[in-house]
Image (tube, grey):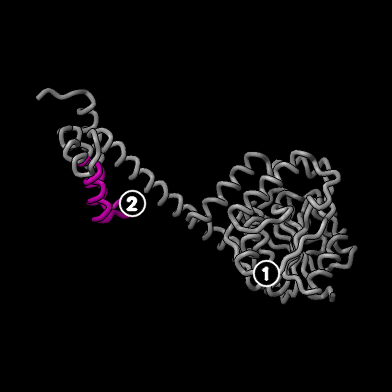
Amino acid sequence: MPFHLYQIIVILIAAVMIYQGINNFIKGINHPTVLKLLVRIVVWGGMAAVALFPSVTFWGAKIIGMEGNMNAVILTAFILIFLMIFKLLSAIERLELQLSELTRKEALKDLKKN
Amino acid sequence: MNNQAVYIVIPAFNEGKKIAEVIAETKSHGYEKIIVVDDGSQDGTCKQARESGAIALCHRLNRGKGAAVKTGIEAAKMLGADTVVTLDGDGQHDPRDIKKMLQKIAAGWDVVLGSRLMNKSGMPFVKVVYNHVGNFLTWYLNGLWVTDSQSGFRAYSRKALRLIDTRSDRYEYDSEIIREIYRHKLKYLEVPIEVRYTEYSMGKAEKQSLLNGIKTVYRMIWSLLS
């Protein structure tokens, strides 16, 4: 089965990302956990699978109930991206609050000293 | 009202040139208990404030006006304040107006809000427009209509100090106070205040520009959704 250029690129990138994940997990770099590794394999493996077997998107679209496989892929991608962005923004906000609290506590130490 | 239990909280960011003057002017009206919160300034504001006889608290990092005011209020509560008045560190607010705010607090009001729009003389037109936009958004998102939702010149009773709990760090803090008033059903009153628009205060880069205004609106909306 002849491969298109985009399929080769996606599979190569996915392979590199999965290899990096497994390598980091084995060497203990960046606090790896089994869950993080599994998520990486599912996400990048999924992209590689879609690149290798594009017809799997028709099956996905049928399950979701959407007309057209590309619409299903794009909608799923959008939802996942929005969820990630929302989670990131919430995490950033929590960090900002904690940073302000720490800054405040340190400033108020001067008051307690005096 | 006994000025002994009144604390003046002044948040300041890079007001090294002005803060000594603001402190001196406030003291000249009989208010000795002044807390200046330096919000990570790079121009010696904290040192100036300390040398001018204020209680100077210094944020190591710039966290925003709201964070600085909250630090000042926490400090005032630790020191046993009955009433806290907040005013800006750039000399825009006239400490003469503190007296009428304290009179209202003594009469039983929980929060007294200084309003520039009740006395618009000298106020740049663009600021009047921004204020109206800010007021509309504050009313729409927080449920309370006030004539100046973005004023930093406010007075709080002991009850208000106990109940108000804010999370906002930056300019959206002023709107969050309005929401807290609504949430806790605090008795509030608006009084006209005089504002001095000088070349110095209008030229400050850190002030509410259109871009900062847009960011403030975004943060107001985000705080409701998250």
Q: Which residues are magenta?
A: A19-46
**Which element carries disc 2, helix, strand or loop?**
loop
Residue B3 screen position, x and y as percent: 84, 73
Q: Which residue is mark 1?
A: B186
How far apart marks 2 and 1 lie (CA) works out to 49 Å
Farthest residue toward the right? B28
Tell me: B139 left or right of B196: left
Q: Is residue A72 magenta?
A: no
Q: Kindly identify the amino acid type of the residue bearing the numbered disc 2.
A: Asn
Using the rendered image of the protein, determine whether residue B72 is visible from the camera's viewpoint: yes
- Chain letter of disc 2? A
Q: Position of residue B84 (x, y in %)?
A: 74, 68
Q: Which chain letter matches label 1?
A: B
Q: Residue B81 placed where, x, y %?
A: 73, 74
Query: In the rendered structure, does residue A27 fall within the stretch colored magenta?
Result: yes
B147 to B6, vertically: above or below = above
Co-location on one chain, circles 2 and 1: no
Q: Is residue A70 left or right of residue A99?
A: left
Given this view, does label 2 or label 1 mark the residue nearer the observer? 1
Left or right: residue B10 compared with residue B211: right
- Look at 87% across and 58% down and name the residue there: B25
Tell me: residue A73, above or below residue B8: above
* Picture coordinates of residue B22, whole percent (x, y): 83, 56
Identify the residue at image location x=67%, y=69%. B186
Could you tell me which secondary element the residue under label 1 belongs to? loop
Q: Which residue is mark 2?
A: A30
